[in-house]
Image (tube, rainbow, N blue to C red):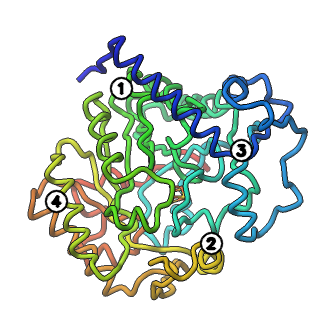
Amino acid sequence: MDTIINSQTLKYNSEITTQRINSLINSFENIFIHDEVKDSEVAKRVISHAPIEKIEIVSEEPFKSDKGEMSSRQYDRSKKNLFLTKFKGQFFKRCPGFSQKKAITCCNYHVLNLGLQCNMNCSYCYLQGYLNTPVLTLFTNIEDALAELKETGINHGSTPLRIGTGEVIDSLSLDPLFLYTPQLISFFKSYPNWILELKTKSNFVEQFINTPHSKNVIVSWSLNPQNIISQEEHGTASLRERLDAAHLCIQAGFPVAFHLDPLIYHDEWKENYKQLVNLITTEFSPQDVLNLTIGTLRFTPEQRHIMRERFGMKSLITQAEMFVSESGKLRYDSVVRNTMFQFVLDLFKTNNKLWNISLCMETPESWIATYEKMPSQISELKSFYKPIQVLK
Ligand code: SF4
């Protein structure tokens, strides 16, 4: 299906995008702009929307002396302060799963990091044990990121790469402000064998929905029952808003994917995940959803302390009984994990055998327990897990 563009949709989408820009600007206490980038497109757009008293032009990273392990107060502050700057390192990398390849099952994912930190606030977020940036940072030099991709394309333009932008920042939750997604989609149009995966818990799709594409941009949502979203995924779009955004993307011809990740154990987990799967299978067909991944709760032992400080003991995450797995992460007991995987998998497969489902960041033991096979032995998944060496 070709993208449908008409002037009414464009006007509606631009009004929504403006409302979202204003609401995003309001969510920040301060906006710091490095003086090197104050004339960049992104900085100019932010300056044109933000009240002057929020903006400070700086010559170095704000709160620089706070580097290192952050306290819960510093971490909270990092989400409320935006910093626009130039990135001088390598944008394009392999997924971190690759470096732990022995302990988890890696799917050849690559990442393009255009910023650091997320403006939403999930209690289980792995960034709490990973990031030490004192401010939410957005790199203004997207042209350098695209140049890196272009360089990779010289030798690997026809290699089937999967590239995601949602590793250390949500792919879309700030996009109305920065408008990177339309640029990425246009770039990927010239590389139809590559897949760009936009992973989000927001419903911000209007800013790119009319961009012509090569059907190689997958928009994916992490989904949970609404009770988990309300209790653990603060500041994110509701389940209804995420599903509505997915419908919009499908109408515009973008493939979508869903991540039921992390599955969170709680008293009514069976009932709530059953309702979630019912909602998905009622509203979508296996042809609409390119793939579904399932993952259970996991986090590093180091982040437990900050999660308790930030979310207290009422959170299902801080209360959870977790065990150290082979990869060093804390996970539910393997019986609980496999029961949850099997339950959700059975619901989908009973509905329709054509649902394409895999386990995300999981141990080989979970694959065997759930599928009786490794991913490389499952015909629908083989291509995802075939090793590809692009970056050294
Ligand atoms: S949306 Fe993703 S990156 Fe943002 S806080 Fe939640 S888990 Fe973390």
Distance, label 2 to label 1, CA atoms, is 42 Å
In the picture of the structure, the residue carrying the numbered disc 1 is 214
**Percent position of residue 254, x then y:** 32, 33
SS at mark 3 in the image: strand
Give the mark nearest the N terminus, 2 or 1: 1
Is the distance from the Cβ of mark 1 to the nearest ligand 1 atom less than 8 Å? no
Q: Quadrant of residue 256?
A: top left
Q: Quadrant of residue 79?
A: bottom right
Give the mark nearest the N terminus, 2 or 3: 3
In the picture of the structure, the residue carrying the numbered disc 4 is 278
Q: Is residue 89 visible?
A: yes
Asked whether the beta carbons under mark 4 and mark 2 sit within 8 Å of each other, the answer is no
In the shown orientation, is residue 169 left or right of residue 48? left
In the picture of the structure, the residue carrying the numbered disc 3 is 82
Give the mark nearest the N terminus, 4 or 3: 3
In the shown orientation, is residue 137 left or right of residue 97? right
Numbered badge on residue 310: 2
Asked whether the beta carbons under mark 2 and mark 3 sit within 8 Å of each other, the answer is no
- Residue drawn at 74 percent across, 56 percent down: 133
Q: Residues within 10 Å of mark 3 (few under 14, many from 20)?
A: many
Give the mark nearest the N terminus, 4 or 2: 4
- Residue drawn at 33 percent across, 61 percent down: 226
SS at mark 2 in the image: helix
Give the mark nearest the N terminus, 3 or 1: 3
Q: Amino acid at mark 1?
A: Ser
**Percent position of residue 41, x then y:** 68, 23
- Residue drawn at 58 percent across, 49 percent down: 169
Distance, label 1 to label 4, CA atoms, is 31 Å
Is the distance from the Cβ of mark 4 to the nearest ligand 1 atom less than 8 Å? no
Pick the front one: 378 or 323: 323
